Image (spheres, grey):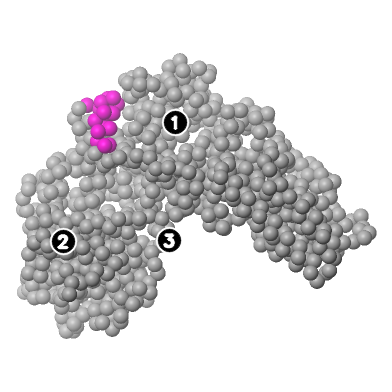
């Protein structure tokens, strides 16, 4: 195929092969120095060429295809110079035999004349038969020269017969050879190889090749997360990346022997407009990939957070109100990935038609033919259009297309999808106000089948964002943090899918309460609309919850919701973070926490709706975010708030719950009444409220054993797979500094504290319960690691090791987190609890952060009663319930300011100088 480098401007500024060849020719034929001197000349030419390509990319950062072609052109010239040097001087033969033929061929991506800075140079040496001694020696010389230049070479040596045999047997080899391109050597030999490849490998195998490449693509997508909208995408291999575009070209070339992407139009696989979109997508993705290689100096294909900011800056994206430069860049990236998906569907549809009428490649056949299609038709079992003007005649049909697909369980023909994309602009204000369109949309959104699948199609076609313009504003919008795994639109559709699966009973094991509550929900469609709108105002200036509620107040009446339903949706959007914030950042054993929460919720129906919305919102953030501990906290808050809303703002139920817990514990322990009564009296009421039954039982047995053995310190560990953590309990005489030393010991052992409940018995003993996870977010369960936790805690409390030195030796914060900056913030709330001062610290997450904060509290001479640790990617939110040393709330402006200063310094990793 013709090299793209032929259209490169000012090619000789990259490398002038004749000039370099002249310099090489001027070197004396001294065997001892020729190779070394030649390597220096070639290395300088390679470095100068790379610098020139980098300069051009810096000057014109969006010219990705040009940069890729320039690197390939540079590699071509270097390879030709090396080949000539080896053949003509280093391995010169005055009279070579007829069998001493050799051709150097570019394969793979290099064969397409596309390369990024750090890409491998994939080459093949072809010989007419088994390589002669001269050919083997020449190939070895060429490779050593290339390695001396620092090039990463992927190479093979084959006779033409071997090439044919291996290409037949191996799809990867066949694909690499499919893109082969002559570089240098015996051109007639290359022509013969290409003729035999087409005649003996390609001929008659088009269908199997298509099937295998699509299966290979699907497997690759699955490895990469199977979504175009992961926030750290793989530009080369990920869904919607360069490899997907390459796959289209491979199929076209294999089936129709096209030699360039532009030829796909001539054979009917792309329209001219689709070709333009293909080239735009390819150009952008190549620009991103080349920038990544240039920044890192290595073949980095994953667009990580730290690279996103740098690439955005190099490609000259600027901040806008409510949108940072990196978020605008990533939105462009995801829109491009979406376009690649659309092009793939259209390409395969054209390919279907080119093979045979109704001879589909992959999609299943219809089991039955729906009777009512409202003017739409079926094409090979897929929903299609009777003519190209069908949508424009009645734009409401753009919504009906997707509703009918859901209603009848139909796939949509890619050509109908293309027409929907083209005609989406016909959705005007009049269409958005049309009651028919809104009824159809609401039917789809609240479908009892699989609404998310079809909503995703609607989003891919651009119809979703046109019909709901506020949703269009969050399409492909990323949230630049380490917490959210998907773009806002993908997160929203995923949340709708989770809600649908809960309603259909498919997640009953994970969410038994939510599954049971769904059958009791009165305002079912209200919940679906609230899930749709909960993040609709992300990326705007201001609180997205408040702004989203305003969107709901405008949009819900248009969708046909009643005033009461609209009010409920707006409330749910406004307070969709309330339940998680309360459960994860507040002490649920403090009754005022429950009262304040219930006062905002006000009704049992709202509570049910809010719980389910909170669950699907958290789970839709990404894999690994949901765990058993969050399930338990949300369930505990739900039950306590439901009791308040049912019984009124009284603590009647609280006393009953405590009594029931104590009865169950007494039965499990089997102690006599006097012994259990004495134990019960030792523990404060807050202990009985805060701890779950299994923790109460573990604590009681541990305390009994420690008291019987007169142990001054007892450390207990018990893996808890249900919570996804390990319970670590410390029983010792209470004294100042106990908490921060325990926290330090746990971190030295490699643990992360996700929750801490600190209790002091009426006779002055500390019973501190910690939930601890390993570095991978799971429970410690290996006996040796559990023993290490117990040892490091004991050493920390006994001052047997220099705790600060051991903490300093731990690994620094994750590299990915360095792409972000979280400004430390301390919020002191004297009204959240009747008994405690509540302090919330927001900071950049890092190892031993909790230890640093706890030490600052120790220095401030306050008592910690509970600590609640929440992590949202790079952001840590640690909340402490505090009193002064006499057990009262912390009072005094100066004292509170001093507390705030110490915590801010600790959050920032600084040591605050104490006053003399």
Q: Which sits earlier in the primary sequence, circle 1 or circle 3?
A: 1
| Closer to viewer: mark 1 or mark 3 | 3
Residue 782 locus on image (x, y percent): 37, 72
* Residue where numbered disc 1 is placed: 462
Residue 442 locus on image (x, y percent): 33, 28
Residue 888 position by quadrant: bottom left
* Residue where numbered disc 2 is placed: 897
Residue at (36, 25) in percent of width and height: 440
| Closer to viewer: mark 2 or mark 1 | 2
Disc 3 crowd rating (10 Å Cα; few below 14, some 14-19, many 20+) is few
Q: Is residue 556 magenta?
A: yes
369 vs 206, left or right, is left
Disc ID at residue 815:
3
Residue at (92, 58) in percent of width and height: 97
Disc 2 crowd rating (10 Å Cα; few below 14, some 14-19, many 20+) is few
250 vs 80, left or right, is left
Residue 769 locus on image (x, y percent): 22, 68
Q: Is residue 602 above or below residue 352?
A: below
Question: Which SS does the magenta portion mostly show?
Answer: helix
Q: Is residue 631 magenta?
A: no
| Closer to viewer: mark 3 or mark 2 | 2
Residue at (68, 46) in percent of width and height: 113
Res 285 visible:
no
233 or 73: nearer the eye?
73
- Marks 2 and 1, Cα distance to the nearest angstrom? 52 Å
Q: Which sits earlier in the primary sequence, circle 2 or circle 1?
A: 1
Res 192 visible:
yes
Residue at (50, 25) in percent of width and height: 422
- Marks 3 and 2, Cα distance to the nearest angstrom? 33 Å
Q: The magenta stretch spans which residues? A: 547-562
């Amino acid at each position: 195929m013709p090299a793209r480098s032929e259209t490169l401007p000012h090619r000789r500024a990259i490398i002038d092969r004749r000039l370099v060849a002249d310099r090489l020719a001027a070197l004396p034929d001294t065997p001892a120095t020729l190779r070394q001197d030649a390597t220096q000349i070639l290395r300088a030419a390679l470095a100068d060429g790379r610098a020139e390509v980098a300069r051009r990319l810096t000057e014109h950062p969006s010219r990705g295809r040009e940069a890729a072609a320039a690197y390939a052109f540079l590699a071509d010239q270097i390879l030709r110079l090396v080949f000539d040097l080896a053949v003509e001087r280093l391995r010169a033969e005055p009279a070579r035999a007829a069998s001493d033929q050799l051709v150097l061929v570019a394969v793979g991506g290099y064969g397409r004349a596309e390369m990024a800075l750090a890409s491998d140079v994939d080459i093949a040496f072809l010989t007419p038969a088994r390589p002669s001694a001269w050919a083997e020696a020449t190939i070895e010389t060429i490779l050593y020269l290339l390695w001396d230049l620092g090039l990463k070479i992927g190479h093979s040596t084959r006779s033409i017969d071997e090439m044919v045999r291996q290409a037949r047997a191996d799809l990867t080899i066949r694909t690499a050879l499919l893109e082969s391109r002559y570089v240098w050597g015996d051109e007639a030999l290359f022509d013969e190889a290409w003729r035999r490849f087409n005649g003996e490998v390609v001929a008659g195998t088009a269908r199997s090749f298509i099937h295998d490449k699509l299966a290979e693509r699907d497997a690759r997508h699955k490895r990469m997360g199977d979504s175009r909208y992961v926030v750290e995408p793989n530009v080369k291999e990920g869904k919607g990346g360069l490899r997907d575009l390459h796959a289209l070209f491979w199929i076209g070339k294999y089936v129709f022997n096209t030699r360039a992407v532009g030829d796909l139009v001539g054979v009917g696989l792309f329209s001219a407009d689709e070709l333009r979109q293909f080239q735009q997508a390819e150009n952008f993705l190549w620009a991103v990939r080349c920038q990544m290689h240039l920044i890192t100096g290595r073949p980095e294909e994953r667009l990580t957070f730290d690279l996103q900011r740098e690439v955005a800056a190099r490609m000259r994206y600027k901040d806008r109100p409510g949108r940072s430069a990196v978020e605008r860049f990533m939105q462009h990236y995801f829109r491009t990935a979406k376009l690649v998906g659309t092009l793939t569907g259209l390409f395969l549809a054209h390919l279907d038609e080119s093979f045979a009428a109704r001879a589909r490649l992959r999609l299943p056949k219809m089991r039955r033919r729906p009777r009512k299609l409202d003017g739409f038709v079926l094409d090979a079992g897929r929903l299609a259009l009777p003519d190209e003007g069908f949508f424009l005649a009645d734009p409401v049909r753009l919504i009906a297309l997707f509703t009918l697909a859901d209603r009848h369980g139909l796939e949509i023909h890619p050509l109908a999808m293309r027409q929907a994309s083209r005609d989406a602009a016909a959705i005007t204000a009049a269409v958005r106000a049309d009651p028919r369109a809104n009824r159809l949309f609401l039917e789809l959104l609240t479908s009892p089948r699989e609404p998310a699948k079809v909503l995703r199609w609607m989003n891919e076609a651009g119809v979703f964002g046109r019909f709901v313009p506020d949703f269009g504003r969050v399409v492909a919008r990323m949230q630049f943090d380490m917490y959210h795994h998907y773009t806002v639109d993908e997160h929203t559709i995923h949340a709708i899918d989770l809600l649908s699966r809960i309603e259909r009973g498919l997640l009953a094991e994970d969410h038994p309460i939510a599954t049971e509550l769904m059958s009791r929900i009165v305002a079912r469609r209200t919940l679906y609309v609230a899930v749709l709108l909960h993040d609709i105002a992300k990326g705007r200036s201001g609180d997205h919850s408040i702004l989203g509620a305003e969107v709901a107040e405008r949009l819900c009446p248009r969708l046909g919701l009643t005033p009461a339903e609209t009010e409920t949706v707006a409330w749910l959007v406004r307070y969709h973070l309330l339940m998680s914030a309360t459960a994860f950042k507040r002490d649920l054993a403090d009754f005022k926490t429950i009262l304040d929460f219930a006062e905002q919720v006000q009704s049992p129906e709202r509570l049910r709706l809010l719980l389910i919305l909170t669950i699907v919102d958290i789970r839709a953030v990404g894999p690994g975010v949901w765990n058993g501990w969050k399930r338990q906290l949300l369930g505990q808050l739900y039950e306590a708030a439901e009791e308040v809303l049912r019984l009124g703002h009284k603590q009647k139920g609280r006393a009953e719950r405590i009594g029931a817990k104590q009865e169950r514990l007494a039965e499990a322990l089997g102690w006599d009444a006097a012994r259990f009564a004495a134990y019960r009296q030792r523990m404060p009421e807050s202990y009985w409220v805060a701890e779950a039954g299994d923790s109460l039982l573990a604590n009681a047995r541990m305390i009994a054993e420690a008291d019987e053995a007169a142990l001054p310190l007892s450390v207990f560990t018990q893996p808890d797979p249900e919570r996804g953590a390990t319970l670590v309990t410390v029983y010792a005489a209470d004294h100042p500094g106990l908490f921060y030393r325990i926290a330090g010991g746990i971190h030295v052992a490699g643990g992360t504290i996700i929750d801490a409940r600190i209790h002091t018995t009426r006779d002055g003993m500390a019973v501190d319960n910690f939930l601890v996870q390993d570095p991978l977010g799971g429970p410690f369960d290996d006996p040796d690691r559990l023993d290490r936790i117990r040892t490091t805690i004991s050493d920390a409390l006994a001052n047997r090791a220099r705790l600060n030195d051991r903490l300093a030796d731990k690994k620094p914060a994750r590299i990915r987190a360095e792409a972000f900056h979280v400004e430390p913030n301390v919020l002191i709330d004297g009204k959240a609890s009747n008994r405690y001062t509540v302090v919330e610290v927001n900071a950049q997450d890092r190892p031993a952060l909790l230890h640093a904060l706890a030490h600052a509290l120790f220095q401030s001479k306050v008592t910690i009663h509970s600590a609640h640790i929440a992590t949202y990617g790079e952001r840590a939110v640690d909340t402490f319930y505090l009193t002064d040393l006499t057990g009262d709330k912390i009072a005094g402006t100066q004292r509170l300011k001093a507390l705030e200063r110490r915590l801010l310094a600790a959050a920032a990793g600084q040591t605050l100088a104490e006053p003399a």
